[in-house]
Image (cartoon, rainbow, N blue to C red):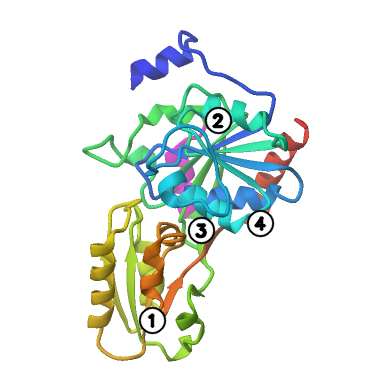
Amino acid sequence: MYIRHWLYDSGILKSKSFSVPTICIGNLALGGTGKTPHTEYLIRLLKDKANVAVLSRGYGRKTEGFILANEDSMAEQIGDEPLQYRLKFNNITVAVDEDRCEGVYRLMRQEKAPDVILLDDAYQHRKIKPGINVLLTEYYNIYKKDMLIPAGKLRDIKCAAKRADIIIVTKSPRVLLPYDKRDVVQLIDAKPYQKVFFTYIDFQGLKPVNNTAKKTVLQDMKSVYLFCGIANPYPLEDYLKRKYNTLITKYFDDHHHFNDNDIDIILDGYDSVIGKNKIIVTTEKDLMRLTNSSFINRFENVPLFTIPIEVHFNDEIEEDIFNNLILNYVGKNF
């Protein structure tokens, strides 16, 4: 990794810049830092001011090459996160390509060329040089205190953080005490050209997926059966534990593609929960791997809910600074 980065830093291997504004959202860890909700934050910030495109590798998909997402796309074709962007924001362009440079070229040749391209999880893709690099790190697992796999969760060396223009400390406490914030800032020890911000997760409340869920009176519910295949389910579990008497979780690997046996296990697990006042919950990302598939119909007789999340900045002044950094960069480039 050191040699690879040195080859790019020294110019022996070339990185490509583009005329269209490009913003990379990535991390140094294997996952669970909140790339998806932060990408969605940028979409919300920009979608009414510019023609936004999101370009992803499409992790976990069973296809190759450049694919434009549409309303009939499935997670197996484009990946769960790109499908989530496409279904939540129908006025943006979503594409996948394992070769990010080729993906940008293809997007720029579209009839409706983007004004800005968000590069989802492209921090390690050194072939492309974004206009702004946004690096995410978890509050309770700052990259400076972590180690490379298999000893830790890092997939990249710590000094790669020097390429970041913005560092966001994610999943921080909603109420962040000044001395706790100071300790994290000192630990990160940002370069003079880097800005450090703090965000927290805001769960938006349960959203019904099917008609059975729409008829359910949530106030009467006592138990939750949660199934999820995400890197870090613990914040969600903590949220649900504070709202319901009983929580039972069925874990799957991150980006897990469900099969008939998995659905049998999930439904049997739900049936085994004692009592009638119970619901079944999954994450937005997991739901994407069921959307437009035959598996979703197997849940029609159980109250299936999902739980959207958003990120918010801990400090309104910092939020304004961040927003202005992004808007000024995008605005001056088109």
Q: Are marks 3 and 1 in contact (CB under 8 Å)?
A: no
Q: Earlier in the sequence, mark 4 or mark 3?
A: 3
The type of residue carrying mark 3 is: Tyr
Q: Could you tell me what secondary structure mostly forms the magenta stretch?
A: helix
On residue 301, which mark appears?
1
- Is 304 inside the magenta-drawn segment? no
On residue 316, which mark appears?
4
x then y, percent, for residue 55: 55, 38
Q: Quadrant of the N terminus?
A: top left
Q: CA distance from mark 3 to mark 2?
A: 31 Å
Q: Earlier in the sequence, mark 1 or mark 4?
A: 1
The type of residue carrying mark 2 is: Gly
Q: Nearer the viewer, residue 165 or 251?
A: 251
Estimate how packed mark 4 is, as few (under 14), some (14 to 19) or many (20 or more) residues with alpha carbons within 10 Å: few
Q: Is residue 94 above or below residue 133?
A: below
Label 4 sits on a secondary structure element that is: helix
Q: Earlier in the sequence, mark 1 or mark 2?
A: 2
Which span of residues is magenta-colored? 180-190
Q: Which residue is mark 2?
A: 103
The type of residue carrying mark 1 is: Asn
x then y, percent, for residue 212: 45, 83
Label 1 sits on a secondary structure element that is: loop
Q: Residue at x 46, y 8 (%)?
A: 12
Q: Is residue 108 left or right of residue 303?
A: right
The type of residue carrying mark 4 is: Glu
Q: Which residue is mark 3?
A: 200
Q: Residue at x 72, y 35 (%)?
A: 111
Q: CA distance from mark 4 to mark 3?
A: 13 Å
